[in-house]
Image (cartoon, rainbow, N blue to C red):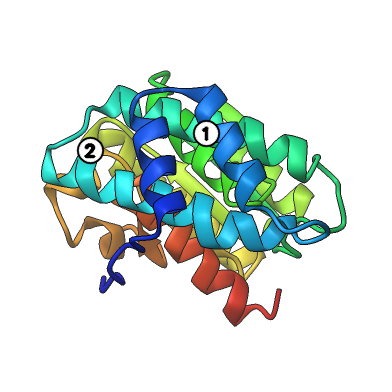
Amino acid sequence: MTRSAPPHSASFTGMLEALLAVDRVRAVRIVKDSSTPGSPVACVETLIVPALEEIGRRWEDGTVALSQVYMSGRICEEIVDTMLPPGDPKRINQPQMAIAVFEDHHTLGKRIVVSVLRAGGYELMDYGHGINAEDLVKQVTQDRIQVLLISTLMLPAAVRAKEAIAQIKKDLPTTKVIVGGAPFNFDPSLWQEVGADAMGRTASETLEIVNRFAREMGS
């Protein structure tokens, strides 16, 4: 996936440094100084999201730790919640979204993705962890989910997700499914084999995919 080069403004550099140092106070101050009254979304889109995407790139390069990715997402999520409280009409007009850890109880990856998406201004339902195919299909159909994110840790679970995805596509043909997790990183073609619409290798890449789907859906 082609990504644009990161901005080089003083506020961007400062925000990046603050997040990597887990300096919430400095991050909040930079956001406040960069925000235009009445336009919090612009700050989210031009400062917070690019900073998170750059941290995601650095994690892929091996220059930052996973804990820094997670804490950066949490800090930005908290900041965005003060700027755009959940339910605020200024939040992104978005498709109905949900995320689940399929047949597994390892939640760190999901928590990072949730933090980054919420920091990007999105809201999504959290179906938790350890959910099986039958319950996932039932929940997605009931909630009329338009974008579903599925995380798996082990290959058998990733393979079994194919059945759930097929049923979801049958019940809700326009629903987009994004998968992620170790099995999909190890086998770049696995996401297509299980019938997903996209694979997010990192939280920041998942945010980019969600942004694309939201645009395609006219949100």
Q: Nearer the viewer, residue 92 or 136?
A: 92
**Is residue 139 in sight in this rendering?**
yes
Horizontally, residue 153 falls left or right of residue 85, namely left
Residue tagged 1? 27
- Mark 2, residues whose alpha carbon is within 10 Å: few (<14), some, or many (≥20)? some
Would you say the residues marked 1 and 2 are in contact, meaning their CB atoms lie under 8 Å apart? no
Residue 124 position by quadrant: top right
Q: Quadrant of the C terminus?
A: bottom right
For the residues marked 1 and 2, what is the alpha-carbon distance in whole angstroms? 31 Å
Mark 1 and mark 2 lie on one chain; the one further toward the N terminus is 1
- Where 199 sits versus 159, above or below? below
- Where 106 sits versus 188, above or below? above
Q: Residue at x 41, y 67 (%)?
A: 197
Residue 122: x and y in percent read 65, 51
Q: Nearer the viewer, residue 209 or 27?
A: 27
Which-is-in-front pick, marks 1 and 2? 1
Q: Nearer the viewer, residue 176 or 216?
A: 216
Q: Quadrant of the N terminus?
A: bottom left
Residue 25: x and y in percent read 56, 23
Residue 79 position by quadrant: top right
- Where 16 sits versus 36, above or below? above
**Is residue 102 in sight in this rendering?**
no
- Mark 1, residues whose alpha carbon is within 10 Å: few (<14), some, or many (≥20)? many
Disc number placed over residue 182 in the picture, else none: 2
Identify the element where label 1 is drawn: helix
For the residue marked with disc 2, what is the amino acid?
Answer: Ala
Residue 93: x and y in percent read 76, 65
Residue lying furthest top: 105
